Amino acid sequence: MKLPRSQTRRINPKAARFRMRIGRSALHRQGVFALEDIPAGRRVIEYTGKRLTLAQACKIRPPQDIYIAWINPKLYVDGRQQGSGAELMNHSCQPNLVSRRVRRHLYLFSRRKIRAGEELTWSYRYPIKVQRVPCRCGARRCRGTLRVLLS
């Protein structure tokens, strides 16, 4: 998945609390890697981007919709535009980051101590029933898809 050419591939230091870099990932194309140890339970980065309404978010079709993050039922964020770099973090079924929604923001916090050089991952858990997107995270308990399968 390519980002628009205007998207600079860097971590926005205003959104990040720790030093990180973007690089080639064994999971999927590019990923974000810690440049320093990150203690458990710490805010790592805010997922930023263009703010969208539900109607605007619904108009974005797969596969571009993978950069859309849910904030609340009326607010979504498109990380392709004005993103913090968090939009380049890969999915894992056993991630080292967890998302927390605080007011009108989406933050990623460390679940455990993260060592310098380790790839930062979080569970996308797309809450929509649409096209299945295969997961290749390699986690022992991988659910096989980036999307939550609804029955």
Image (spheres, rainbow, N blue to C red):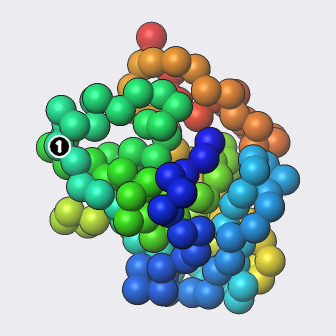
How far across and how far down the image is residue 41, in percent?
Answer: 52, 77
Q: Residue at x 43, y 64 (%)?
A: 83
Q: Which residue is mark 1?
A: 53
Q: Is residue 18 left or right of residue 13?
A: right
Q: Amino acid at mark 1?
A: Thr
Q: Residue at x 28, y 65 (%)?
A: 105
Q: Nearer the viewer, residue 131 or 73?
A: 131
Q: x, y percentage for residue 2?
A: 60, 47
Seen at 54% across and 69% down, the residue is 8
Q: Is residue 73 in sight in this rendering?
A: yes
Q: Nearer the viewer, residue 8 or 67?
A: 8
Q: Which residue of the protein is positioned furthest toward the front in this rendering?
A: 5
x, y percent for residue 47:
41, 64
**Quarter the C terminus occupies:** top left
Q: Quadrant of residue 99?
A: bottom left
Q: For the residue carrying disc 1, how many other residues have a C-alpha within 10 Å: few (<14), some (14-19), or many (20+)?
A: few
Above or below residue 17? Residue 97 is above
State whether residue 98 is above or below residue 44. above
| Side (left or right) of 110 relative to 143 | left
Check the picture and name the quadrant holding the N terminus: top right
Q: Name the residue located 54 percent from the left edge and 51 percent from the top edge.
A: 3
Q: Is residue 18 left or right of residue 24?
A: left
